[in-house]
Each structure stands twice: as structure tokens, then as C-alpha cells.
Image: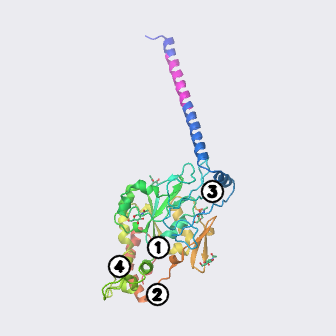
Amino acid sequence: MRSPADSWCRWGGRLAACMVSCFLVALLVTLHALYDSAVYTIQYQGGLSDEGLEAMLLANSADMFTAPEVPDDPGGEYLGGGYPGGGDSGDVTIVSGNVHTNEVDKDLHFEDKEDGDEDVGRVRFPRTSRRLPQCLIIGVRKCGTRALLEMLFLHPRVQKAAGEVHFFDRDDNYSRGLEWYRKKMPHSFPHQVTIEKSPSYFVTPEVPERVRAMNASVKLLLIVREPVTRAISDYTQLRSHAATASPSPPPGPPGQQQPQGQRSFEELALKPDGSVNLAYRPLSTSLYYSFLHRWLDVFSRDQLLVVNGDLLIEDPVPELRRIEQFLGLEPRIGRHNFYFNHTKGFFCLRNETADKCLRETKGRRHPRVDPAVISKLRKFFSEHNQRFYDLVGQDLGWPEE
Ligand SMILES: *[C@@H]1O[C@H](CO)[C@@H](O)[C@H](O)[C@H]1NC(C)=O
Ligand SMILES: *[C@@H]1O[C@H](CO)[C@@H](O)[C@H](O)[C@H]1NC(C)=O
Ligand SMILES: *[C@@H]1O[C@H](CO)[C@@H](O)[C@H](O)[C@H]1NC(C)=O
Ligand SMILES: *[C@@H]1O[C@H](CO)[C@@H](O)[C@H](O)[C@H]1NC(C)=O
């Protein structure tokens, strides 16, 4: 039997124990916060030169900030040099953030060591790290994948991998594992989207499964153009590469077959009996349906956005709006980011600090192709295009002759 005083004591004891626990928890939380902010300050000061600090202060007060010069990109795809991102030179773009809220409101770009050697001579901000891409541009070759990536890079919340990594489609790269792939990615903040593009992903059978193994909810961008135009563009590029690769025909027995580079598109696209030669890669790649269904066996339809490459070049902003929405980004890319260069007949891109236009060869002139052959190919493709429209639930309105 207990006396009332006895149970009063017990109750009081519990209360005291409870209060002590509360106090300890509060103390721990406070210490943790203090520790965090101390580490943060150390990282911040350790990682930033005086110039960087000044830049940061400027960036936090001014509306626009001019970045230091970026290194030349000799292997790049752009006219005039001075722009990163074309070749495989591993340019890294680092975006500054407000250190207190970690909100990126201004962009800062720093020079990176040419060979991409990790963490040497690089200014790094807390909380940036290399992340696996959350979005891939999977193809299609010759449909404007590079232009698309460069346009998206105008958005402050987009980071892009340099060059084409070819991780998922090349066995030797894939066997190096995801850590290798991650190290090919640029630094980014948690709220930024990292995008990689390798157009051969689209046509390589193993790729969809491998991408899913990385991230089953990844977002995919597929840019397409009218299939016959695409095939001719593909032919044009292959021919110009063949021409630069072997300026003089290699020695061989007389009567040897003419190299592909010298043959006309009409000869390659049609068999001698006049039927369509689907063994010719530039044509088979344009059978979008046959590749896309493999992707949609693995990913749900809402993870894939089909971008109309012909529209993107003609009038980029509406297409980019759709993509921003798809990626969950606020609309930021607008008319002010583009101007048309009449000499080139092509859009040039402009951000706060620089202009860049696609290199001349990107707008390579197509050879004149016999209109009867074009019409024949378009008729042939119309049935395949219809299957593609049905699969994606979107009619791209490509001509049927
Ligand atoms: C991936 O492998 C290919 C050879 O299969 C190579 O040419 C390419 O450069 C590799 N990618 C990278 C980023 O090393
Ligand atoms: C997977 O991709 C989705 C969509 O982009 C992204 O939100 C998510 O963070 C990614 N997951 C990982 C682990 O990267
Ligand atoms: C347009 O392109 C031409 C040829 O490349 C170049 O010389 C000219 O400066 C460009 N004009 C503008 C306004 O960018
Ligand atoms: C503007 O574009 C150039 C060329 O791509 C790039 O080097 C630079 O970092 C960009 N600046 C901003 C503020 O995004």
C-alpha cells in the first residue's frame, strides 16, 4: 500500500527527469547548430580567395556580375572560341549561392584546370557537389541535341555535363561504374538539375535498362526532326567526316568499291530496284518508333518529353517553356536570350555575360537531293511516323510527300 506522499514523490521525480531530458536535448541541438555554422564558416573561408569573396559580396548586392574569362575551347563546337562546353575538355561551371540561404541568385563562373583534375585550383562553394544527372537528352542524333542543351543551360538552375559522356552505351565506360560517371558531372547545388546528353543512347538497346538502374524516375528529353531531313543531315555529316578522315582514297586493288563518303544520298537511300534501303543507318535511325518503344517499355510516358527540333530552331521560346515546366523549373528563358543572325540563318544565344552562335558546320548546307527521292522517302516514312505519333500521343505534322 502506498501513501499519497509516496506517489507524489514519484510523480515529482518523473517530472524532474523529464525536464532534465528536455534541457539536454535543447543543449544538444544548440551545440549542433553552433558546430555546423562554425564548420560552414571554415569551409567558406577556406574555399574562397579574396577575389572570390569580393565577387560573392558583389553578386549578393548587384543584379549582374561579370565572370572572369573562361578558357578557350579549341575542340569546341562554337565559332570564335572562348566558349566552354563544346569538346570534351571538362569545363566546369560553378554557380555561386547565397551562403546563408543557399539560394542561387547570381551566377559566378570560375576557370577550371583543363584536364579536369579533381579539386585542383578550383574555387568551390559549400554544398555544391557532383551529382548524377536527373535528366538525360537521349537523342536523336542530328536533331539539335547540342543546341537544346546549350539553350537549357541559359537557365540558372541547369548545369550541363561537358561533351558527350557515352556512359550507358559504351560497355567500357559502363563497366567503370556510377562513381566514374558521377565524377564526369559538373558541380551543382541541390536544387539545380544536371543534364547530360549523348545522342547514341536513343538507338542502343542496352541503354534504357541501364538508365533505369541508375534512377528509375529520371527525366528524359527526346528531340526529333522530320525524319527525311534528319537522314539527309546525318548523311551530310558522315560524308564530311569521311572527307576529312581520308582526303585521298586508300590504296587498294583496282575496281574497289567507292567509299561511302563519295556516294550520293540517292544512291545510298534507295536500292537498285528503287526500294528504300533500311540497312542504311541514316535512314534506320529515323525510324523513331522502333527505338522509342524500348524506352517506353522501361519508363512511363510522363517521364519523357518529346521536343520538336524543327520548332525549337524556328521559335525556341515556346518549346523551352514546355521543357522548363517538365523539369519543374520556373520560366526564365525568354526572347531576350535569343537573336537571329541573318548571315548565318541561325539563332544565337545570349546570357548576361556572353553571346554564342552555333559553329558554321552545325548549319552545314545539305546537298541538293532529288525531290522525287525525298517525296518517295516521305511516303515511306508516313506510316512509321503515324506509329510514332500514336506511341507518344502527339502529332508532329510531318509532311507525307
Ligand atoms: C567512353 O568510351 C569511348 C570508347 O568506347 C571513348 O571514346 C569515350 O571517350 C569514353 N568517354 C569518356 C568520357 O571517357
Ligand atoms: C532521380 O530523378 C528524379 C527526376 O529528375 C530526381 O528528382 C531525383 O532526385 C533523382 N534521384 C536521384 C537519387 O538522383
Ligand atoms: C552574324 O554572323 C556573321 C558570320 O558568322 C558574323 O560575322 C556577324 O558578326 C554576326 N552578327 C551578329 C549580329 O552577331
Ligand atoms: C553565359 O554563357 C557563357 C557561354 O556559354 C558561359 O561561359 C557563361 O558562364 C554564361 N554566364 C552565365 C551568367 O550563365
Could you tell me how far apart the alpha carbons at marks 1 and 3 are, in whole angstroms? Answer: 32 Å
Judge left or right: residue 313 versus residue 232: right
Q: Is residue 7 magenta-colored?
A: no
Q: Is residue 56 left or right of residue 326?
A: right
Respond yes or no on whether mark 2 lies under 8 Å from ligand 3.
no
Badges 4 and 1: C-beta atoms under 8 Å apart? no
Q: Earlier in the sequence, mark 4 or mark 3?
A: 3
Q: Which residues are magenta?
A: 10-26
**Residue hosting label 4:** 280
Q: Say whether disc 2 or disc 3 marks the residue closer to the N-terminus.
A: 3
Question: Residue 53: image x %, image y %?
Answer: 65, 51
Circle 2/circle 3 CB separation < 8 Å: no
Secondary structure character of the magenta stretch overall: helix
What residue did someone put label 1 on? 143
Q: Residue at x 51, y 64 (%)?
A: 323
Q: Secondary structure at mark 3?
A: loop
Q: Quadrant of ligand 3?
A: bottom right
Q: Position of residue 112 (x, y in %)?
A: 55, 59
Q: Amino acid at mark 1?
A: Cys
Which one is earlier in the sequence, the residue at label 4 or at label 1?
A: 1
Residue tagged by mark 3? 106
The answer to whether mark 1 and mark 3 are in CB contact below 8 A is: no
Residue drawn at the location 47% of the way across and 62% of the way down: 196
Which mark lies nearer to you, 4 or 1? 4
Helix, strand or loop at label 1? It is loop
Q: Which mark is residue 367?
A: none
Residue 88 in view in this figure: yes
Give the residue pinned by disc 2. 368
Q: Marks 1/2: CA distance?
A: 19 Å
Cα distance in 3D space between marks 4 and 3: 48 Å
Amino acid bearing label 4: Tyr
